[in-house]
């Protein structure tokens, strides 16, 4: 990282070195809080992707990482975690000035999460069953049978702009733990923290060439990565639309794919809910990171009997959220990631009004108090939303909450599941038995009871339906980065004791 004309400068990171793109081209990263460039980043093309993949392949085949023992790899993961702790302030800064994430969230949660994930993955990989001996069976003849777990090879990791750091680590930690090489492509708005992570990994002892980062447009160089014949697996987090395209492209070379896609998660408020917990909990669920979280609780389903009170209290509490420069300690909600994203969200707000939803809070770009040049949107709440409205069906990825009325629990479940997505859901009630019963009926990869956003390094995360497939986090993620090999060794030493040969020979 160096500073040129006051802009931070980030080349590509290939084979442990910072290298410019072959084309010599750069693109700018904009600070969404002020609408000004903060960095220029190398714009990779097909030849750079090819170089990164070739390096990753050669490094993998050399065995310098892939054939290290799990304990040796775990040691490097622990050292990597330590490097992140030592460089936390810088990483937080890079993440905030590109993604608009608040200091309070990044320093108080994201950094802790990625460190915890590395440390826990180090534990999981040493406890993992890399070799499983199958029980011997006498028929058709005694043999020794084992199932080996092997690294897949070269993994391409493609990440979105909302949580660049966390989503990079969700892929990187298990991929490295199992001995794979990685070529990562962060989103063009937010590549800075990923490029810094790659440097820190090498400083922590990861051999050069194991973790490479290429930056540039998804549509061209992202596709070069997805279609590259030397890439064995694609781990993608992003929109459902791009996920579909990636799945199609990956079929050309029959790659393994895991997809973490969009969501439209329902938060169901039962009549007996403790509203002292539920009101701030629902708002935390939807407005954290300005609503730009895949598992945000964007649809709140409220029982008739408490509907008016809940709407009123949600609106009153949302109005207390303080917008501002994300790097200020006092800021609760920062900007959305880009001008384009801001415009998309404003169009959805307009659609909500036109479809007849009742705006009870926010509804426009936030200005004044130093916000004028940034991409800030007021926390926005629509009441009287029907589940077939555009704002209830489509992922907005902004601070917009839809409140939907229901009159019995079967109806609530039906509305909750009436979406193409299935990433997360929440239930607010004092009746735990009822909550568990409903959790069984909800089609989503994560269900929170009286909570939201509580993910753990040891619990699987992923989607049902069009929210994707495969799981990240925990020991479950290790499975996604391995090949299974069955090895059979015959213990039959005499030809005469191999009756199956008579099937072919008389
Ligand atoms: P996006 O799909 O536009 O882009 C994601 C990444 O894919 C970026 O790096 C982009 O450059 C790249 N890309 C785009 N087109 C590509 C192509 N044709 N081939 C290869 N790569 C391509 O998503 P986004 O706008 O960056 O992020 C927001 C989306 O991510 C939302 O839909 C959100 O729900 C989703 N998301 C999901 C999860 C999850 O875990 N399920 C987590 C965070 C975000």
Image: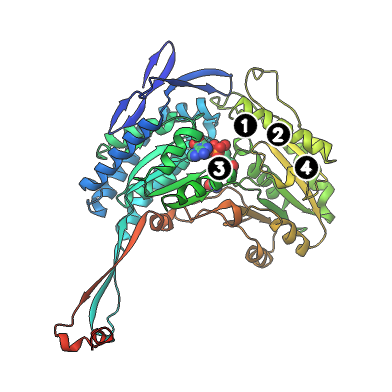
- Provide the residue designation for mark 2: 379
**Ligand 1 contact, mark 3 (Cβ < 8 Å):** yes
Of callouts 4 and 3, the N-terminal one: 3
Judged by depth in the image, the label closer to the viewer, 4 or 3, is 3
Secondary structure at badge 1 equals: loop
Q: Nearest the camera: 150 or 500?
A: 500
- Provide the residue designation for mark 1: 333
Q: Position of residue 466 (x, y in %)?
A: 60, 53
Above or below 455: residue 283? above
Q: Nearest the camera: 152 or 119?
A: 152
Q: Where is residue 42 in the image (x, y as percent from the top left)?
A: 41, 24
Of callouts 2 and 1, the N-terminal one: 1
Q: Report the disc number at residue 313.
A: 4
Q: How far apart are marks 4 and 3 (CA)?
A: 37 Å
Pointer 4: residues within 10 angstroms few (<14), some, or many (20+)?
Answer: some
- Provide the residue designation for mark 3: 242
Judged by depth in the image, the label closer to the viewer, 3 or 2, is 3
Q: In which quarter of the image is ligand 1?
A: top right
Above or below 16: residue 439? below
């Amino acid at each position: 990282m160096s500073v040129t004309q006051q802009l931070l400068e980030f080349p590509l990171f290939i084979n442990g070195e910072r290298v410019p793109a072959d084309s010599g081209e750069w693109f700018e990263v904009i600070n969404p809080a002020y609408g000004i460039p903060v960095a220029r980043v190398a714009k990779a093309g097909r030849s750079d992707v090819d170089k990164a993949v070739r390096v990753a392949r050669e490094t993998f085949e050399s065995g310098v990482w892939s054939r290290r023992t799990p304990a040796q790899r775990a040691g490097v993961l622990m050292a990597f975690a330590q490097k992140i702790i030592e460089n936390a302030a810088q990483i937080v800064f890079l993440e905030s000035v590109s993604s608009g994430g608040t200091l309070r969230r990044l320093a108080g949660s994201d950094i802790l999460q990625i460190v915890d994930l590395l440390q826990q993955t180090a534990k999981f990989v040493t406890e993992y069953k890399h070799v499983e001996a199958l029980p011997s069976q006498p028929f058709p003849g005694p043999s020794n049978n084992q199932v080996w777990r092997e690294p897949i090879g070269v993994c391409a990791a493609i990440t979105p702009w909302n949580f660049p750091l966390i989503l990079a680590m969700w892929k990187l930690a298990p991929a490295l733990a199992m001995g794979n090489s990685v070529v990562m492509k962060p989103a063009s708005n937010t590549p800075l923290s990923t490029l810094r992570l790659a440097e820190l990994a090498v400083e922590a002892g990861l051999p050069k060439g194991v973790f490479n980062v290429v930056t540039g447009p998804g549509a061209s160089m992202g596709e070069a990565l997805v279609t590259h014949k030397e890439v064995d697996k694609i781990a993608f987090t992003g929109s459902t639309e791009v996920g579909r395209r990636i799945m199609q492209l990956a079929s050309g070379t029959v790659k393994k794919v895991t997809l973490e896609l969009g969501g439209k998660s329902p938060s169901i408020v039962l009549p007996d809910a403790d509203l002292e917990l539920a009101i701030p909990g629902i708002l935390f669920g939807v407005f954290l990171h300005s609503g730009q979280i895949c598992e945000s609780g964007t649809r709140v389903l409220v029982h008739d009997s408490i509907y008016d009170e809940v709407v009123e209290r949600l609106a009153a509490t949302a109005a207390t959220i303080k917008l501002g420069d994300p790097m200020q300690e006092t800021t609760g909600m920062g900007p959305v990631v880009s001008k384009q994203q801001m415009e998309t969200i404003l169009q959805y707000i307009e659609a909500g009004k036109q479809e007849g939803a009742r705006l009870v809070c926010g509804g426009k770009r936030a200005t004044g108090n130093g916000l004028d040049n940034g991409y800030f949107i007021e926390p926005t709440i629509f009441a009287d939303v029907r589940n077939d409205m555009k704002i209830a069906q489509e992922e907005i990825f902004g601070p917009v909450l839809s409140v939907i009325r229901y009159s019995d629990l079967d109806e609530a479940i039906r509305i909750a599941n009436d979406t193409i997505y299935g990433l997360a859901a929440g239930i607010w009630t004092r009746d735990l038995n009822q909550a568990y019963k409903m959790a069984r009926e909800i089609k989503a990869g994560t269900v929170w009871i009286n909570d939201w956003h509580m993910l753990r390094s040891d619990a699987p995360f992923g989607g049902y339906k069009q929210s994707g497939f495969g799981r990240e986090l925990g020991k479950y993620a290790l499975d996604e980065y391995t090949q299974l090999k069955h090895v059979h060794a015959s213990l039959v030493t005499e030809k005469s004791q191999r009756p199956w040969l008579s099937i072919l020979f008389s």
